[in-house]
Image: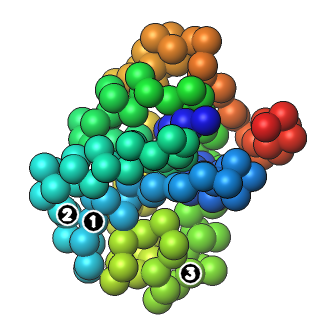
Amino acid sequence: MKISIIGYSGAGKSTLAKRLSEILNCPCLYLDTVNFCENWVERDVAEGNEMVREFMKNESWVIDGTYKKRFLFNERMNEADKIIFMDFPRVVCLYNAIKRYIMNRNKTRESMAEGCTEKLDFEFLWWLIYKGRRKLRSRKFKEICERYPEKTVILKNRRDVERFLKSV
């Protein structure tokens, strides 16, 4: 089984990826660990692409993260047996991000690159509530769901996530 999890920041993609990886006993790749090096420095795209290419050679996998313009996006979508779109409301994503920050302040989460401590700055908050929710971005998610309807699952809340996990 190959699963690609996409969606809005703060929706819980990493949490779901970890749970699916454990249930399916397969490796998990968090694209934030590919995109960033220590101290939130962005990795060279070619190097990141190679990391993802190598990971995708696994027989089964879970990949967490959208990165539509990076890291072999089309290949990830094409190879995935399931595409999970986490379409949570903006306010829920904001709440989750604030809660995550409080729980992980001054720590590096498993889903982040080593040396990238949890942060909640204005730039990220602006991304959560505005930039990451622009109509063009929402339209791109809709296009992905329409392009791969037979293998796309849309999860809109925690209840949907729990129902989906029970079906796996």
Q: Residue at x 58, y 12 (%)?
A: 149
Q: Secondary structure at mark 3?
A: helix
Q: Are marks 3 and 2 in contact (CB under 8 Å)?
A: no
Instruction: Report the disc number at residue 104.
Output: 3
Q: Earlier in the sequence, mark 1 or mark 3?
A: 1
Q: Are marks 2 and 1 in contact (CB under 8 Å)?
A: yes
Q: Residue at x 42, y 75 (%)?
A: 119
Q: Residues within 10 Å of mark 1 (few under 14, many from 20)?
A: some
Q: For the residue marked with disc 1, what is the amino acid?
A: Phe
Q: Secondary structure at mark 1?
A: strand
Q: Earlier in the sequence, mark 3 or mark 2?
A: 2
Question: Residue 143 lies in what quarter of the image?
Answer: top left
Q: For the residue marked with disc 2, what is the amino acid?
A: Glu
Measured Cα–Cα span from mark 3 to mark 2: 21 Å
Quarter of the figure that contains the N terminus? top right
Total marks shown come to 3
Residue wearing tag 2 = 42
Q: Residues within 10 Å of mark 3 (few under 14, many from 20)?
A: some
**On screen, residue 73 above or below 62:** above
Left or right side of 148 for 135? left
Viewer-nearest residue: 20 or 163: 20
In this view of the protein, can residue 10 be seen by the observer?
no
Q: For the residue marked with disc 3, what is the amino acid?
A: Asn
Quarter of the figure that contains the C terminus? top right
Foreground: disc 3 or disc 2: 2
Foreground: disc 1 or disc 3: 1
Residue wearing tag 1 = 36
Q: Secondary structure at mark 2?
A: strand
Measured Cα–Cα span from mark 2 to mark 1: 4 Å
Left or right side of 154 for 7? left
Question: Residue 48 lies in what quarter of the image?
Answer: bottom left
Residue 101, image x, y percentages: 54, 75
